[in-house]
Amino acid sequence: MPDWSAALIVPDSDFNGAPLLRREFELEPDHGDVTSATLHATAHGVFEAFLNGQPVSDDVLSPGWSAYEWRLRYRSYDVTALLSSTSVLGLALGNGWFRGRLGWNGGRNYYGSELGAFAQLEISFADGHVQRVVTDDAWTAGPSAVLGNDLYDGQTVDARRASDAWLQPGFLGQGWTGVHTGELDSQTLTPYIGPPVRRQAELAPVRTWTSPAGRTLVDFGQNLVGWVRVRVSGPAGTEVTLRHAEVLEHDELGVRPLRSALATDRFILSGADDVFEPTFTFHGFRYAEVEGWPGELAGGALTAVVVSSELERIGEFSCSHELLNQLHSNAVWGTVGNFLDVPTDCPQRDERLGWTGDIAAFTPSAAFLFDVEAFLRDWLADLAAEQQAADGMVAFVIPDVLKYVTKDDPEASSFPEPDSTAVWSDAAVWVPWALWQAYGDRSVLVDQFDSMAAHVARVETLTSPTGLWDTGFQFGDWLDPTAPPENPILAKADNGVVATACLVRSATIVAEAAALLGRDEDRARFEELAARTRAAFGEHYVTDDGRIASDAVTVYALAVAFGLLEGERLRLAGERLAELVEEGGFHIQTGFAGTPFVTDALTVTGHLDVAYRLLLQEECPSWLYPVTMGATTIWERWDSMLPDGTINPGQMTSFNHYALGAVVDWLHRTVGGLAPLEPGYAKVLVAPQPGGGMTWAKTALATRRGRVAVSWSTEGADGFSLEVELPEGVEALLRLPDGSEREVGSGTHRLSAEPTRA
Ligand code: BGC
């Protein structure tokens, strides 16, 4: 951590919420050559940094969104190559999450009303001298070409005002002002744990056409998150507007799901050849409506730029079923789009919040597709900071901006006084545990243990005298497909059953984590709580003939998957689960709580065939129905788009929500057959369970120990054949569909056996 001498500086004028800040300086003489130069920078708002006219990095939207009250992250850049004897350090600011709009009630400024910058450039010389150039009152501030910027609403840029002169020495700065210092507690400054946000890919339009209402529409062929880069020339002062949306409805742009987010960029032309890129906003979109374009909209004029946290893709899956491959691709795109610094519910409407339940459901899937360890550990540090200030309660969203939204406007929240809620608050336990399983680095448990334990300890205080967690507000099996569109909380599964099952799971995990960390007292305490809660569940919720209260698919799925039942009760629960799924015509009947676990629960109770029929259902509601409707991301609702092509009338209808895509974890482990037998794949379980008429699947993962690949086929002459590749030092237990097992070491292994098909 640097020894800070910088101050937070605030421009004397706001300059449309997009001020520029500059400082010119000379290298101090007589110290020999510069050996290194590092710029540390952060902001209240978002920043882009420049040295001598060059951006110091490809990062965008830094310092992202963290629990600013406790953790304001800074970025550090090696800028040695950009220095010269006279240099200009420049910072461009935007509103970002700090001062922009957050939440659905139109509020903003939750973290402060002034934008500010904090930077410290440290230049080391050959003789050991260090020169520091820091943000202080010697800086000046001025206007940029950006006339307005907001993450939800979009950005307005006037190219007539664009100039790089401010980044050059000798700039006169007409119309510029001074700066004053603002409040910043340097104790909150912390380096990033996770990766920066960067541009990831570019997509050209696949189609441009005129809608029935006469509007110009563009389709980028993929629902994505980022912005459109525009190349345009036309008369000075011409205004080109781009409005973004995920879907079309009645052949026009379907903007209702965005609610109050305007998702509109405006570009004012300079008269020369202009290139616009609105880097202080982002949109979730596949389509754009273009207005005011001068002349013909030529190919190459618009490029969709995909923006996300920089994550390494590590996991692959493909199989003989094309719709499943598209479902998998949809989950991949959902991860890219919703891992933009914070793991969000959705990236497009007036929300984009770090909803804890969504990532609690999706972490095992995300952790296979991408290396999300550092990303989620950064977020977990925010979770722990927020939780500590809230007496152990894990809020609905992290960073918890809702605590301000609801304070400002109690009407804005339809929720009662927030307290721990099952699945959502369980993120404190389930997310670090999933990271430990996926990557095998126990330091995540060391760092998070107090937070994990504090969550479960708080929930224990919320249980009723019966020992059940049947009190307080719950989201429960949120978005059960039979819940009415306007009331997604009305699930068939009983909230107490769901919550009590989650408490057993979380207490069991915390006990296991305590055992791993040698915390014997904690282990004993949480084992006892898990046992006591499991017994209460059995006593109050399970009848002698094996029925579980509310008799819904989700309650059986959770009871089985979370280890709440044994022996005959387990068998009966598996049977009832399979029966209910069949009675439901193999349509999905679960919401956020049950969906990640229903296929596993069917599989372990011997109903693999039912799991496949559920997986491969194409009618609504099902995993594949959206795919048949052309989805390129996972939808929030099973029927975000209704079969007749109209958008679901519910207020909450996103087309890019990863939570219900958590089934891809089952695809990797059960269809593909690749799972960790020990955390971090120190030992691998290779146990594909073919079914559903599928004839091949291929799964591969770049583990911390090297690449593991599994592929199987029933197409060859040998019946079922399996090929497994293991890196040096990694062993696997192979379990063939006929149940036979063998242990193998590193290298390539080919086997065949008679298939037992589901
Ligand atoms: C979000 C969800 C979230 C839920 C909780 C919604 O508005 O989009 O994904 O978990 O609220 O109620």
Image: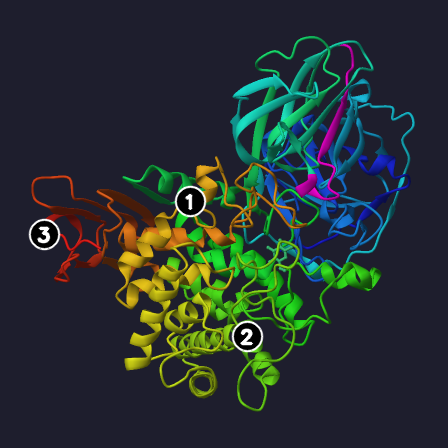
Label 2 Cα neighbours within 10 Å, binned few <14 / some 14-19 / many ≥20: some
For the residue marked with disc 2, what is the amino acid? Asp
The image quadrant where one finds ligand 1 is: bottom right
Q: Position of residue 92 (x, y in %)?
A: 75, 35
Q: For mark 2, what is the residue?
A: 450
Residue 143 position (above or below residue 539):
above
For the residue marked with disc 3, what is the amino acid? Ala
Regarding mark 2 in the picture, which secondary structure is present there? helix
Distance (Cα) linking label 1 and label 3: 30 Å
Q: Are discs 2 and 1 less than 8 Å apart at CB?
A: no
Q: Quadrant of residue 282?
A: top right
> Which region shows up in magenta?
256-271
Q: Is residue 628 left or right of residue 316?
A: right
Q: For mark 3, what is the residue?
A: 753
Instruction: Name the residue located 30 percent from the left edge and 45 percent from the top edge.
Output: 700
Q: For mark 1, what is the residue?
A: 624
